[in-house]
Image (cartoon, grey):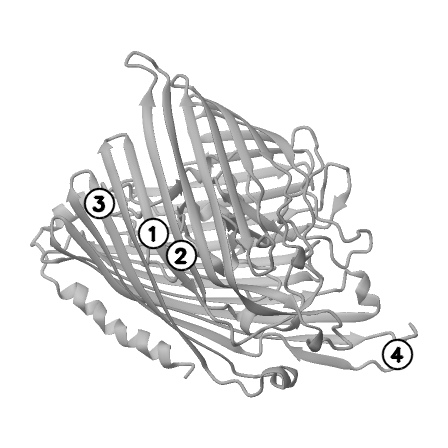
Amino acid sequence: MKNKYKWLMLACLPMLSFGQEIKEEIINDQDSIEFLASDKIHLSDIIIKGDFFTDPTFTIEVNNQDKKAVQPKNVADLFQDVDGMSFIKRGNYAIDPSFRASQYEELNIQYDGGVKAMHACPNRMDPVTTHVLPEDIDKIEIIKGPYSVRYGANFGGVINMVTNKPDLGDLGISGDLKAGYESNGNTYLTATGLKYVANKFHLKGNLGYRDFGNYKDGNGVEVPSAFRSTDYSLGAGFSPSIKHHFMVNWRQSFGRDVLHAGLPMDTDSDDSSIFSFDYYADHLEGKIKQVAFKAYYSFVDHVMSNSLRPSFNKMSAISEVEATTYGGKLEAQYVPNESLKLYLGADMFNVERAGTKYMIKKLDMQGNPIANPSTMESDVWQDAYVNDLGLFVEANYQFKKPLVLKAGLRLDFIESKPELVAENFKQIYGELDTYHDTNLSGHIGLKFSPNKKMIYELAIGQGVRSANMTERYINYFTVGQDRYNYVGNPNLKPEINCQVELGFKNKARLNENSQIKFNYGASVYYSMIENYISAIIDPSLATMMAPDVKTYINVEEAYKTGFEFFVDTQINPSCSFGTSLAHVYAKNKDFDESLPLLPPFTAKFNLMYEQDDFGANLKFRALSTQKNLATSFGETETPGYGIWDFEMTYMPIKGLSIGGAVQNMFDKAYHNHQNFSFVNQSDFGDVPINEPGRNFSIFTRYSF
């Protein structure tokens, strides 16, 4: 059964010839060269293309990542300015993005329109954001809810990180060199990238190295947070004509000596490899205008231990775990007439995990050394796998010029099973067979633009998410923000998110003769969640080695509601001021408490000054006290705070930019509500991890 979906996907491979057999226009080679020299080929990795007709409803696009004056630590740091986005922090490396209080597999996080690299560690020491070089990210695209079915199962939103592609108009060799330093932690990084573009093909490569030390918080307390990482990526593209494009990408990441203040162990090594292949046919004749195929494979090898923790003196522990992820997508755009575009396709996503935890008990119950300690072994993932085969159709219909209807349906066939079931897990659930879910998702939405500056949007969507591997099959492992051991539940029902959203965007000028311009917008949403997956204490599962145990259950009723608002004011061509507000409220009706990891009300303000060769940005971020708590997860009230940052960039000559920044200017001691607490640390109690104190940084970039 494990290989069933593999063969179904492989059976689709011959369909590639379908795209190649479609009738093409007869064009000469010179025409082909002229086209390739003036266009940037994006293949099928772009979700948001600036097309009112085809772009999904309620999207966010974050561009110009290279202009950041403060170097990011990993990809998650690129999300800092996104309204509604917050972060789950276990240290300074393993940072998970959270959007509107949706996190982990509730968000569909991917690269280039579908590539995934799932974590191997049950504690998420290696989330997807750690496996790609931040300097390789060109822009970030977000679909803010279950408003598209084309990019995999979508429960609470899609986050697509688009990697750099060469501009095919820049023939020849180009590249850049980057270096940066941060004072708080004595941190430095280096990175370089090269691109070569010819008429019909291109090559690219990136290489980066980071060495981050322990930072100090606003109280001057050193937080265990050091890490080292080396990343590189290689890519090649070939376009034999203006209608057919091929691309392959290979990337690897190597993390070493990563300290996780909020987890019971640290990372000794974390190695990941990702391969992807894309084929894209465009400008085709007939009713089928586009055909896209994508395939990818990733492998993560993760080793963690408690060798630097106080518990090591009593019991040494080391876990060796791995994750294999592979999948693909085949999609065609069918255009029966000028008013209707249909996207029909199939995709597959598969993840397999395995691993063993080795423990050596060194002291007996009285604290005396054990003469001949034995090694105990436990299986971490029970050699489990999860397959998802999805079929989808999505339509864009233009009633008349300013009104577009968007609708889609998706059917996911989920298959999961642990291949090596632990005896203690069998005692709880008996013999385990293959589990199957059939999930139906869909959406319908309207976009209305009465003029070129105003857009109204309305969307209703249903996203369905089957339980992930941790929730199904984890076997006595501490995986949450509390200290409990967790036991999976293979009988969980899929979560269902029914979400409705209304919003608008507008651009205006103070008056016809004024330089002052406004760009503003807002959206409000309500989300009703059925079968929400949570966890409860189960005393019947307690053992001598694990006296405090939780297991996963379905909560019948929960909901979320919230809003985002922004206004950007351009005072003159060089100076602008921005304000944004974001708030989400959530309720677990069964437990009569909040959903866990709920971010507080957030307000952001920034004052920018920008010339061709100089820019400055003063930022202020304020978060309110969070009193809406999930007490069953041990959450406590988090105080509000306000933080000032300042960034500046200067270009003394063409191609050279120098950036400087001061983060947390007034050295405030603070922590976010979603930060984990210190675990198994000799100098810290059970208190949340504080964010870094004042930090000075410098960042240089030379492009050629």
Q: Residue 370: name its quadrant.
A: bottom right
Residue 288 placement: quadrant: bottom left
Identify the residue at horizontal 72%, vertical 75% (top origin): 542
Of badges 2 and 4, the one in the foreground is 2
| Residue where numbered disc 3 is placed | 404
In three-dimensional space, the C-alpha distance between marks 2 and 1, rounded to whole angstroms, equals 8 Å
Percent across and percent down for residue 442 are 32, 59
Q: Nearer the viewer, mark 4 or mark 1?
A: 1
Badge nearest the viewer, 2 or 3: 2
Query: In the rendered structure, are the residues bearing label 2 and label 1 in contact, judged by CB atoms less than 8 Å apart?
Result: yes
Residue 419: numbered disc:
none
Between 549 and 661, the residue placed more toward the observer is: 549
- Which residue bears the numbered disc 1? 460
Q: In terms of secondary structure, where does tag 3 sit? A: strand
Three-letter code, disc 4: Ile
Q: Earlier in the sequence, mark 2 or mark 3?
A: 3
Q: Is residue 641 left or right of residue 235?
A: right
For the residue labelled by badge 4, is the local secondary structure a helix, a strand or a loop? loop
State which tag comes first along the sequence, 4 or 3: 4
Q: Is residue 166 above or below residue 309?
A: above
Whether residue 46 appears in this view of the structure is: no
Distance of label 2 from label 4 (alpha carbons): 56 Å
Residue 296 seen in this snapshot: yes
Instruction: Estimate the x, y position of residue 291 in percent, counting from the top left.
Output: 22, 60
Dots 4, 3 in contact, CB < 8 A? no
Q: Which residue is mark 2?
A: 498
Residue nearer the viewer, 292 or 101:
101
Task: Of the two numbered discs 1 and 3 on the same chain, state the one appearing first in sequence.
Answer: 3
